[in-house]
Each structure stands twice: as structure tokens, then as C-alpha cells.
Amino acid sequence: MDHHQRWRPTVNEREFIERALQSDLRVDGRRPFDFRRLKILFGREDGSAEVQLGDTRVMGYATAQLVQPYKDRPNEGTLAIFTEFSPMADPAFEPGRPGESAIELGRVVDRGLRESRAVDMESLCVVAGKHVWSVRVDLHILDNGGNLIDAANIAALAALSTFRRPECTVGGEDGQQVTVHDPEVRDPLPLTIHHLPIAVTFAYFGEGNIMVIDPTYKEEAVMGGRMTATINSNGDVCSIQKAGGEGVMSSVIMQCLRIASVKAADITSKIKNEVNSYTSAKALQKVKRLPASALKKDNAPDVAMKESSDGALETQSTKPSSDGQQINKEPPSVVEDNKQEDVEPMLSECNPEAQSESRLTAGGSDEMQEAISPKSLKDAVKPKHKRKKKQHSKS
Amino acid sequence: MEKSRADGRNPNQLRPFSCTRNPLDRAHGSARWAQGDTIVLAAVYGPKPGTRKGENPEKASIEVVWKPMTGQIGKQEKEYEMTLKRTLQSICLLTVHPNTTTSVILQVVGNDGSLLPCAINACCAALVFAGIPLKHLAVAIGCGVLEDGEVILDTNKAEEQQLKSFAHLVFPNSRKSASSKEPNQKEEDSERGLITSITHGVMSEEDYFSCIERGLAASSRISDFMRTTLQKQAPGDV
């Protein structure tokens, strides 16, 4: 339909934004090389994360299933990024077919993550040539405030960092039988992530002599060109995307890369901190769960282990009730007290004492830290001839 | 006599509800509605000029887009879209903006049972925040019937697997008259009709009526919550 249109600035708005930029002023009051405020929230389920970069919101959700591997890579799992611009984010986005920019976004995130071998694929292999884990990351664009690529990239990293796949063992007579263990029986395993490739987007204005970082949707509508550099905290360049637009001097590009590597280090530490506090809060929940279920067992000996499957709900106070038919007045009124304001149920904050406690008790969080500790690209990417040899010998 | 449920609630107890006003910047109105761990984000754009082919141009039309957490939308999601569209059509004043389209987009953020009722509540709140003219609010509740005929409200995912059958019911909001000090609850409730009823599985007539009875009682609690949420958070209204 023709009334679905991208936001277009008026002539005056365009001129205002450009004039202000000439004297290093941006419409939202930032300096040219400031990122907007980054906020990462996690859902109750492992592998779901919501990223807010200023007004831009992206939700990432990672899932996995056992599949047959590709013939040319029998001992590697797969990672796929799915993006679709939801009409929720912008009236210009149409449901159904992904547009040009949706495909570009998906490809940039995919190249940065998969082709730089940030996630270890060989550890996702269960039986070579038969069963491997296929990890799928869905990126939902919820609100388009500009610079979707950077936000989507962070959402994908946050989702993958908290994702846990069920543990499975190989057994049976022929040694090919795969048993997938219930997450309640055996703790699910995190992915091995070698490094976090961070996308940093620059917008160019004028004849390519003015540049800003992390453009808003208003700046995106005015800009003459854009470049996204994906860099990890070690300074390795994982991908650079500049699809046409205004030509930019190579010296400016070098400057951009230097700035990007500083920003990448900032964002990496931010993601790691958030992930750590989430995992330690999660571990704490597990510790808390035990006495609760033990207590329940005393009261009703026939209560099965079921109880532990809903850790979050157990923290809810159980109100003894006497009323039969009438609806319990308690829950709505309780809700009104504390949920009136902007409630963020996904926010994973834990108090300092809880954090220190969990570090002592939970081994899981330490493991996590190790798993996402920075390693250079060289660890992730094997020399090409070695890989080839392996494939030949297998096939 | 009262059996408590796996998560410690009694059969009539609802999970904690929460509603966030306009979490999204670009949408004309949006709401994040949570019932326990079931969370749905709804965004409203509109009214935009023109209706789609096949819609009545003398009335406003509503389009609903459902976004699941992962994967493509299937038949069930299509059914949800259809149910939502018809439910919303019945609560909106369609003649105020003829020949316009209002889009409602839903994103599932967390699914722990009673997904459709949560989505309907989210939509309704988002429509209010977008300022779309409504006749009244719609309040949805999920009722489940256990094997022994007991009815439980606001079912979660673990409970939904043990149910014999379940009904998703939508009621108009309870009326609040300013004049009478003590509103006659019984009389008031009987005036409120059922907007939508989606049932799955076999249930006896008695079970169905007991679902409606309990659902109606619960819906007035939810509509109280919705009303206070909408009133408190509207900064322009005094």
C-alpha cells in the first residue's frame, strides 16, 4: 500500500540537521562519537534478550535443534540468523516479505558472527555426519529509532551468550543413539563463544567530511553514506560493510576503525557485565529453589519433582485461601502497588550481597565467564589447509 | 476442599499482571502486557487512510499481524489473528473513521500459557493508548477444565498440558456507575455479554457454564486493574 512510507524529513528539517552537524551538534544533543544509551534485558528463558539502544529496540531469541549436518562439513553445527522487519517497528515495514534493508541487516550480522567463527561450531557436533546442533537466532526489530544493525548485532550476541542447549550423550548398541537430557536432570550447556564481534555504524554527511557514530532514524534519512565496521575487543576487523553512498577518504576510514575498536571494547564489557549478572542471578535462583522444594516435600510427601520446573513462580507468595467461589482479591491489588510504573520484568538486576553469594556457590557462572573470555581470531579460525585435510579424511 | 496448583495458586487466583504504557517510540500506541511469564507486546498504527480490498470502505477496518517468538506463522497463529481481528472489530467504534485502516501488531515476548487472552488484553490496552475510539474495553481470561471437572483460571503452560479442555473467554469491561454507592454486582454482571469464546477439547455443558461464571467474576478484577492502569497513567487526563 502506498501509505506505508518511510519517514521523510521536510526541506527545513533536512537543512536543520545538516547545518547543526557542520558545527558538531546533533539533534538529540549527543557529540559526534557518542553512542546512545545501551540497555540489555534478559527474559526468563535462556537465550532471549532485549536490547535498547536509545529508542531502538531489538529482541533476540536463540533456539537449537538436532539436525543432519551439511555434507561438506559433517562435524560442524550450524548457526543461522533470521531477521524480519516487523511492521511494529516502523510503518514503512510491511509484513511478509523481508525488504532490502532487512536482508542487508541479516547478512551483516551473519557475516560478523558466523564467518568470523565467533561461535565454536565443532563443539555443536554430536555424531559426525549424523547429528549436529543447529542454532537459530531470531532477531525481532521492535522499534526503529535508527541504527538497527548495531542494536541487532548486540541482541544476537546477548541471546547467544545466555543460550543453553540441552546436554546429550551418545549411547546404544551401535554408539549412534542420541539421548537428549531433560534440562532438569542435567544442566544445559552454554555455547563456546571465542570473541564478540561488535558492529559499529558510522553515517557520513556532506561530501563525506562529516561523520557521526550510531545515527538515529532522522539522521539516517538525511545521511549521504553509511559504513558498518564489525570489530572485536582485540581489534580484529570481522567485516566492513559500505554499500555505495558518498565516497569516503581512506584516512577517514582508518580513523573510523580506530574509533570503532574503542567502542567495541566498551560494548563488549557492557555485554559481558550484563550476561554475568544475569547468569549469577539465575544461579542464585537455583540455589534458592532447593529449600523451597524440600519444604514442600514435608507438607505433602507425594509432591513430585515437578515443583522445580517453575522456579520463578515459586518466589510468589502462596496465599492461603478460604474463599471458594469468589475470586481472590489479593493478586490484582498487589500488582497495582508495584507494577504501576514502567515495570521491567525482564530486568535482571541482583543485589550486591546476592551476587557475592552466588559466586561462592555457583560453578555455572564461572564456567560462563571462561566461555566468553576473549580469544583472538587466530584461535577461532583454523588454518585452511588443516580444515580441508580433515574433511577429506572424513569423507 | 481447595486444591492448590503446582505453582501454589488456588484455582481462582490469577498470576501477577503488569502493563507498561507506550514502551515503543515510533508506534502510535503500544502496550506491554504481562501475566506471569506470558508477555505480549502490542503496537498500534493508525488510523491510516484507505482500506484494503474486500473491506467495507464505509467503516474503519482493522488489520492484525501476529509475530511468534521464533519461526514462521502457522495455522494457529492465523487463527489467533482472525480471532483478534473480530474481537477488536466488535469493541471499536468503526463508524468514526470510515475508510481507514488501523494496524495492530503483536509480538510474543514470553509464552507461559494463556497466550491468546494475554494478547487480547495487550491489544485492548494498546488501542486505548493510541487513542482509537472504543465502545468499551475487552477483557480476556483463559479458563481450563481439569480431568475431575475442576475449573482453574489463567492457566500456565505446565497446567495446559494436563487440561481436559479449555476455554478462552472475552468479556466487556465491568461497568462502574458513579451514582450508586453499592452497585448490585449480580445484576451488573448479568448485563455483560460474552464477546468471544474459543474452546478446545470436550467439556460438558455444566463445565462450560462454570467456566463462564468464574471467568466473568475474574474479568471484573482484570477490568478493574485495566481501568486503574489506564487512568493513572494518562498524564493529560484529569
Image (spheres, coloured by chain):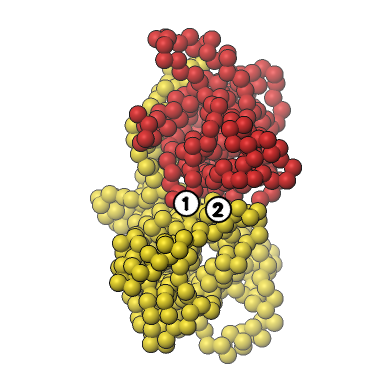
Chain colours: A yellow, B red
Q: Is residue A48 in view from this perspective?
A: no
> Of A166 and A247, which appears nearest the observer?
A247
> Of A154 and A37, which appears nearest the observer?
A37
Which residue is label 2 attached to? A91
Which residue is label 1 attached to? B26
Q: Which mark is residue B178?
A: none
> Of A318 and A243, which appears nearest the observer?
A243
> Of A145 and A261, which appears nearest the observer?
A145
- Circle 1 packing at 10 Å, graded few (<14), some (14-19), many (20+), is many
For residue B77, what is the image quadrant?
top right
Q: Residue at x 56, y 36 (%)?
A: B120
Which amino acid type is shown beneath numbered disc 2?
Answer: Pro
Number of numbered discs visible in the structure rendering: 2
Query: Are marks 2 and 1 in one subunit?
Result: no
Which amino acid type is shown beneath numbered disc 1?
Answer: Arg
Judge whether A76 appears above or below B79 on screen: below
Secondary-structure class at tag 2: loop
Cβ atoms at labels 2 and 1 below 8 Å apart: yes
Judge whether A274 appears above or below A249 on screen: above
